[in-house]
Image (spheres, grey):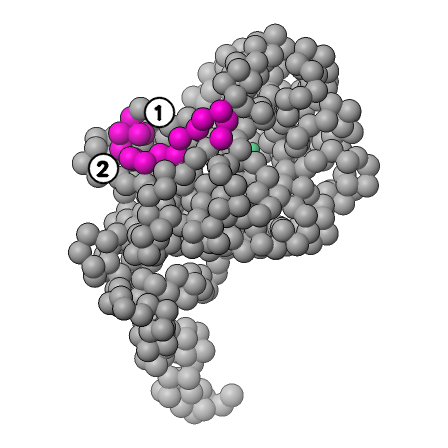
Amino acid sequence: MRRRDVLKYILTGAAVECINPFFNSKVLGEGLKQEDTQSYSKGLPQLKITDVKTILTAPNRIRLVVVKVMTSEPGLYGLGCATFTQRPLAVATAIEKYLKPFVIGKDADQIEDIWQTSFVSSYWRNGPVLNNAMSGIDMALWDIKGKRANMPVYQLLGGKCRFAADTYAHASGRDFQEVEDNVRRYMEDGYRHVRAQVSVSGYSTYGAGSRKAIRQKEQGEIKRIFDPSPYVRIVPKLFEHLRNKLGDEVELLHDIHERIPPIMAINLAKRLEQYRLFFLEDPFAPEDIGYFKILRQQTSIPIAMGELFNNPNEWIDLISNRLIDFIRVHLSQVGGISMGRKIAALSEFFGIRTAWHGPGDVSPVGHAANLALDLACYNFGIQERVIFQEETQDVFSGCPVIKNGYMYANEKPGLGIDVNEKLAAKYPFPPDELEGSWRPIRKSDGTVIRP
Ligand code: CO
């Protein structure tokens, strides 16, 4: 282009449009017209998003991010989970500075259009911060639609396939006996599925506490040491012990938590196959998903994967090539209910079941979203459960209840959870200069490993 042409190009605005299509006033902010969706909301007034609030609270010292979306109908609002507990303030900024002004004034009924337009509004996309921010809005809009229809969200998703969601509990211990005792306790409480983790003496072992871990304070950093070899030696012995003592009926699960080199994980999976696990979780880090094909050729142990996934390219091949058995994404990490239901539908066609991530760093709103999908999706597998502590239940009313290992919906319209904002404010994030960041875990030689 000659200089004069370049100038003309800039002056016509073509360059600006090319860089940012939202500069085009024809596209800016309008969304779909009311007439376009009128038939769907017959008899109901159009609902505008009037405000968005980000609620930061830590009732049980876990940093939770919850989004409240207000509408033009007085008293009608929705809640969504946007909890990314290691980066909560980054998510809050993404909501307050970017998504809030983007969605105010939009039609609250247009959940999919709001999702898709928010998704591309950052141009760069599929990261955990922005996905969580989008999830906060997305779940809140499903909550609003449910309240408006006077139905629980699972009804909007197709209705119940089962009376409740079967869950699994976490048992751990310092030695085999302690793990066994804890599994037994859950079995007596009615659980049919229990995850078992044992601590490796002298090491910081995932899911098994770190009471015996080496904790040397060196240059201000508490050392958490983990070496793969002692861990892979002990785990098959744990499951041999549990099967011998507990019999065949209880379903046992285990989480490798992406901590060991891929080839060691394959070897461990093969040795665990004989103990008939319900699933083996996260054998590889997301960066090593190429190994699933190799694993699959060597063992029929059921595999669960995906709590760290953000991007469809991480799960599409694993699902469509039938390389895993349970998809375990963290709903807020992939963008909420809208994305979750698509992942469930894709999985159904390939015989893969859902096992949504459900730890303590999912807010009760997020657990209710998990449960809505659990109830409505045909290919539900299992739900990781959490016991909501008293303080959390005080801040969030309507938390799902577990009886005999089954998680039940409270049957209220929407997601069925409410938040007491005054009380939420009484539980600010606990003081921490790194705001909840995951602290490094190192091998004995000092090499940092994936958590
Ligand atoms: Co896990």
- Specify whether tag 2 is near ligand 1 (CB below 8 Å): no
Residue at left offset 54%, top offset 23%? 191
Mark 2 and mark 1 lie on one chain; the one further toward the N terminus is 1
User: Dot 2: what SS?
Assistant: loop
Considering the numbered disc 1 on the image, is that residue within a helix, a strand or a loop?
loop
Location of residue 77 in the rendering, given as x and y in whole percent from the top left corner: 26, 52
3D distance between C-alphas at marks 2 and 1:
15 Å
The image position of residue 103, as x and y in percent, is 31, 62
Please report the bounds of the magenta region as a residue range. 391-406
The answer to whether residue 304 of the structure is visible from this angle is yes
Residue most toward the right? 298
- Magenta highlight on residue 403: yes
Instruction: Say if the magenta span includes residue 230.
Output: no
Which amino acid type corresponds to the residue marked 1 in the rendered image? Answer: Gln
Residue 22 rendering spot, x and y as whole percentages: 37, 73
Residue 168: mark: none
Q: Nearer the viewer, residue 10 or 399?
A: 399
List the residue tagged with mark 2.
Answer: 420
User: Crowding near pointer 2: few (<14 within 10 Å), some, many (20+)?
Assistant: few
Q: Is 437 situated above or below 132?
A: above
Q: Is residue 144 above or below residue 171?
A: below
Name the residue beneath numbered marker 1: 389
Q: Residue at x 29, y 26 (%)?
A: 391
**Looking at the image, which is closer to me, 66 or 108?**
108
